[in-house]
């Protein structure tokens, strides 16, 4: 029926043989490289130590794409259309907080459901405990990345080891777990309002028609070219249910040009959720309740 | 189907590599203590450009043309006066432990960064640690205020034209680069300082630090074209004026 559904259906049958097979074979080839490279990546805390449960799970399920050490350079990475995340140097993008830092739950969501419509497969076979261990693992790599950069850049200027520890932890710990706010009772979808808000806050980058043609040479925080999403034709990577879109629009996409909208009233963000779905050619329901029931086309 | 990997073949990797982070013995950087400064000294000086400064670049305006084309935009990256003074350099006393307090926060004089004519004004703004930076949008078009902070949490906040003002707070002293992704030429620096002895050079490249307790200090000059700051030492005597000169050269580190 919808693109998402058929894709999910495809994914369910296609994932194990194709992705699983490739993952397994690349892992075998890189097995030894993996351990020595991994061990030389720098400081290893217990959460990510060689032989820890997180390490085992990560090497078995994730390293083929995300790289033996989590730097986004797995053997399989170059055949993907999207670069796997470099956990050391890039922030998590799919967050539900206003300070741009992923909660553990956000990370678990990404691992469990997969991202970018299946280029990162969903880990449906992982248990809740596996997911939790893996989330801790990648968050810790992210923190170690901060440690590494802070040490490189500021140790000579007198930043103490204690401060490096403190700041690196702060950079991966959110202070504002964002609850998805409930639309106000008087809320009703209003596409004219949505269009105005979109023109004010989104069109500069996404273009008035949503084609992603507003910016000249957008770059991510690593300085690499990044495309503004064509909302009319390209898939949404972080999930396209109303709640997920709400978070994406309100929190922005850390590490990319897309800003958060902390200054926008939540009901206006909901109007933008509707308008974005309208651009995507999705059904719009105007009742606030419909926004909160998980979308059926997932 | 769950791919398995046996690590057994590779167990030669010594377990000893699993090292806990040694929490360093280094002392924390001294934190600043505000005291009453009676008959301190003054440091004055200038930052000069060595050689012939390049002409200021005219920015190629590609987005929000109606607003941003209102008047030509010239890059603030390197602004040198006719006499060779470098504007927008930051001169600061390094690791000063004791000195005057910041002036009482005054709503009229709050550190402010305006987005006006698709330029951040001023290009460099000093923010006392603990105070907020007021951020304005006078353009009526969408800007996004994107900070590149490392010691402080990063922010990337949309400021649509209908929003004229917001504020940002940074906990730790840091020189923070701020950009706008929609207008890629827009760039500013917010210098969060622990103490009031941090100033931005004026259009002639001059600076002045007042009420400095007598003593010997490391004084630093930073300009965005430099990778690291330039450090000199300066001696301040009660009630006297000390002179310091910095040069910025094309080949500086």
Image (cartoon, rainbow, N blue to C red):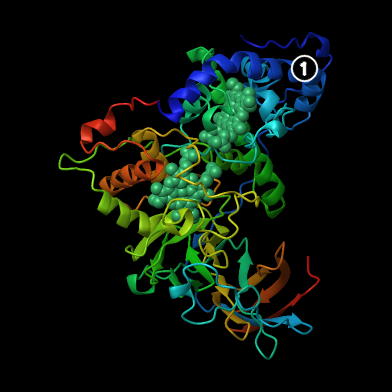
Q: In the rendered view, would you say B209 is above or below A95?
A: below
- Locate residue B243, reporting x and y percent: 68, 83
The foreground one among A242 and B222 is A242
Please determine whether, in this image, residue B221 is positioned above or below residue A82: below
Tell me residue A94's x, y (percent).
48, 36
Vertical placement of residue A174 versus A128, above or below: below
Is A158 left or right of A205, judged from the image as shown? right
Answer with left or right where residue B103 lies relative to residue A120: left
Q: x, y (%) of residue A233?
A: 48, 42
| Residue B186, picture quadrant | bottom right
At x 54%, y 61%, the residue is: B179
A8 vs A155, nearest the viewer: A8
Classify residue A178 by image quadrant.
Answer: top left
Q: Which of A197/A166 is in front?
A: A197
The residue lying at 66 percent from left, 29 percent from top is: A66
Residue A272, x across and y down, in percent: 33, 47
Q: Taking the image as drawn, is residue A252 in sight?
A: no
State the residue position of label 1: B15
**Quadrant of the drawing holding the C terminus of chain A:** top left
Lateral position of residue B199 relative to residue A88, left or right: left
The crowd level at tag 1 (other Cα within 10 Å; few <14, some 14-19, many 20+) is: few
User: Which residue appears at 33% of the width and 28% of the height?
Assistant: A295
- Horizontal arrangement in the rendering, residue B166 relative to residue A76 (left or right): left
**Does residue A228 show up?**
yes
Tag 1 subunit: B
Residue furthest to the left:
A186
Residue at the image point whose x is 54% and y is 48% from the top:
A256
Viewer-closest of B20 and A120: A120
> At numbered mark 1, what does the secondary structure look like: helix, strand or loop?
helix
């Amino acid at each position: 029926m919808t693109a998402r559904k058929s894709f999910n259906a495809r994914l369910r049958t296609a994932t194990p043989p194709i992705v699983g097979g490739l993952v397994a074979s690349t892992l075998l080839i890189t097995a030894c490289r993996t351990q020595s490279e991994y061990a030389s990546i720098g400081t290893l805390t217990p959460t990510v130590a060689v032989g820890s449960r997180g390490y085992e799970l990560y090497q078995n399920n994730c390293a083929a794409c995300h790289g033996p050490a989590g730097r986004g350079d797995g053997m399989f990475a170059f055949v993907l259309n999207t670069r796997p995340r470099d956990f050391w140097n890039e922030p998590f993008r799919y967050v539900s907080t206003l300070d741009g830092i992923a909660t553990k739950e956000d990370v678990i969501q990404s691992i469990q459901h997969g991202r970018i419509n299946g280029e990162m497969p969903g880990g449906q076979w992982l248990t809740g405990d596996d997911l939790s261990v893996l989330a801790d693992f990648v968050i810790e790599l992210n923190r170690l990345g901060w440690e590494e950069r802070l040490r490189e850049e500021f140790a000579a200027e007198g930043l103490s080891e204690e401060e490096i520890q403190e700041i690196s932890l702060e950079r991966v710990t959110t202070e504002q777990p964002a609850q998805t706010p409930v639309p106000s009772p008087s809320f009703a979808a209003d596409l004219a309002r949505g269009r105005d808000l979109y023109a004010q806050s989104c069109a500069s980058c996404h273009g008035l028609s949503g084609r992603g043609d507003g910016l000249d040479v957008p770059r991510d925080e690593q300085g690499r070219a990044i495309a503004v999403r064509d909302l009319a034709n390209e898939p949404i990577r972080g999930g396209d249910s109303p709640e997920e879109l709400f978070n994406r629009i309100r929190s922005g996409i850390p590490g990319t040009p897309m800003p958060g909208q902390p200054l926008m009233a939540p009901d206006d963000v909901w109007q933008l959720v509707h308008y974005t779905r309208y651009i995507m050619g999705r059904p719009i329901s105007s009742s606030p309740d419909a926004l909160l029931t998980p979308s059926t086309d997932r | 189907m769950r791919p398995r990997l046996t690590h057994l073949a590779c167990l030669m990797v010594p377990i000893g590599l699993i090292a806990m982070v040694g929490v360093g013995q280094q002392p924390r950087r001294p934190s600043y203590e505000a005291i009453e400064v009676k008959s301190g000294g003054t440091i004055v000086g200038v930052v000069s450009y060595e050689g012939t400064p390049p002409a200021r670049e005219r920015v190629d305006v590609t987005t929000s043309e109606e607003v941003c084309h209102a008047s030509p935009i010239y890059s603030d990256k390197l602004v040198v006066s006719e006499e060779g003074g470098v504007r927008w350099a930051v001169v600061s006393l390094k690791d000063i432990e004791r000195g005057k307090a910041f002036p009482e926060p005054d709503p009229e004089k709050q550190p402010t960064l305006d987005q006006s004519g698709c330029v951040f004004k001023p290009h460099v703004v000093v923010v006392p640690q603990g105070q907020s930076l007021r951020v304005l949008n006078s353009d009526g078009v969408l800007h996004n205020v994107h900070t590149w902070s490392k010691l402080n949490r990063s922010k990337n906040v949309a400021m649509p034209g209908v929003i004229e003002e917001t504020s940002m707070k940074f906990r730790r002293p840091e020189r923070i680069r701020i950009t706008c992704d929609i207008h890629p030429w827009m760039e500013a620096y917010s210098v969060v300082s622990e103490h009031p002895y941090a100033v931005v050079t004026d259009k002639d490249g001059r600076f002045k630090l007042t009420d400095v307790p007598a003593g010997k200090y490391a004084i630093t000059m930073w300009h965005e074209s430099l990778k690291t700051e330039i450090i000199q030492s300066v001696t301040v005597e009660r009630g006297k004026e000390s002179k310091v000169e910095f040069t910025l050269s094309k080949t500086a580190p």
